[in-house]
Image (spheres, helix red, strand yellow):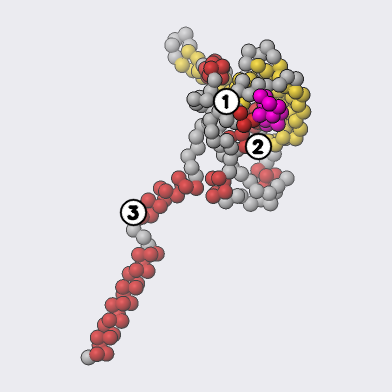
Amino acid sequence: MAMCLLLKAFHRLTALSAVRRTRLCHPPACVLSRAMVALPSVLFPKRSDLSLPNSSWGSEMMRLYEHYNGQCEVETQGGQKQRGLWRRLPSYNRSLKYATGGAYLSKIIQSKARFFTRHIRDPGAGFEYVLFSNKEEKKCVCIFQAGHLLEGFPGHVHGGAIATMIDTVTGVHASLIAVPVMTANLNINYRSPILLGSTVLIESSLDTKEGRKIHTSCKVTSSDGSKLHTEATALFLSISVGHLLKGQ
């Protein structure tokens, strides 16, 4: 009799253990559903367009933004809306990252990475800018306002920050022609310093495209175009994804 009771108790424990293992290995559908919804928000946060107006934008930056944005859509004689010559280019704080050697960075590392000009989170403290492209005229225009963290000579924008924006604008312009591209040469002449907090225009123009080579010229002027701050030329090479994977 005692032996029978022991056997029954053993069978109950075995069955209970199996149920627990099943629950652990196969959680309820509602748990899986919640996990699948939460996972993308952790590893793949929703991208925010950082080229839209915010409270840090000065009146001159807003004026130029409205000027170019107003040319992205025009009204016909019949009162219909149609796409204009200019197009606003959205800007995000991250993009797909590649590691040399051909291996992708993990999704967790990618989620923490930041595009260089968008690594400062405080609005107005670093690089505030918005880009517009004109395919017909083969131009790209950037409205740029430099924050206090970009100071070089007291009260003025650091030359490296200006070079960064020139590389960004000409690089975006080149990528509209052939993507992806990488900078091969950047030649800059500084003409006049830029005051911190002021708004300037950075304009990139296509010079030539020869095979993989894309030559552009760029100038940085005051918001009304009357003063030349910087001028530059840039050479970009179009590359394949294979080049990126091989670290070439």
Q: Which residue is mark 1?
A: 130
Quarter location, residue 94 = top right
Q: Is residue 149 left or right of residue 31?
A: right
**39 falls in the magenta region:** no
Taking the image as drawn, is residue 139 in sight?
A: no
Pointer 2: what residue?
180
Q: CA distance from mark 1 to mark 2?
A: 21 Å
Q: Which of the two discs, 1 and 3, labels the residue nearer the N terminus?
A: 3
Please state the horizontal and vertical placement of residue 30, each as a whole percent of the image.
33, 53
- Give the left or right position of residue 136, taking residue 46 as reference: right
> Considering the image in quadrants, where does the C terminus appear?
top right
Q: Residue at x 35, y 72 (%)?
A: 18
The total number of labels drawn is 3
Residue 172 x %, y %: 64, 30
Amino acid type, residue under disc 2 in the picture: Pro
Residue drawn at (47%, 47%) of the image: 42
| Amino acid beneath label 3 | Cys
Q: Nearer the viewer, mark 3 or mark 2?
A: 3
Marks 1 & 2, CB-CB < 8 Å contact = no
Residue 30: give its label.
Answer: 3
In percent of the image, x 28 and y 77: which residue is there? 12
Looking at the image, is mark 1 or mark 2 nearer the viewer? 1
In the picture shown, does residue 216 fall above or below 104?
Answer: above
Q: Split into 4 quadrants, where in the image is the N terminus? A: bottom left
Q: Secondary structure at mark 1?
A: strand
- Out of 136 and 222, give the one closest to the viewer: 222
Which range is magenta? 151-165
The answer to whether residue 97 is left or right of residue 30 is right
Closest to the observer: 176 or 153?
153
Disc with the residue nearer the chain's start (1 vs 2)? 1
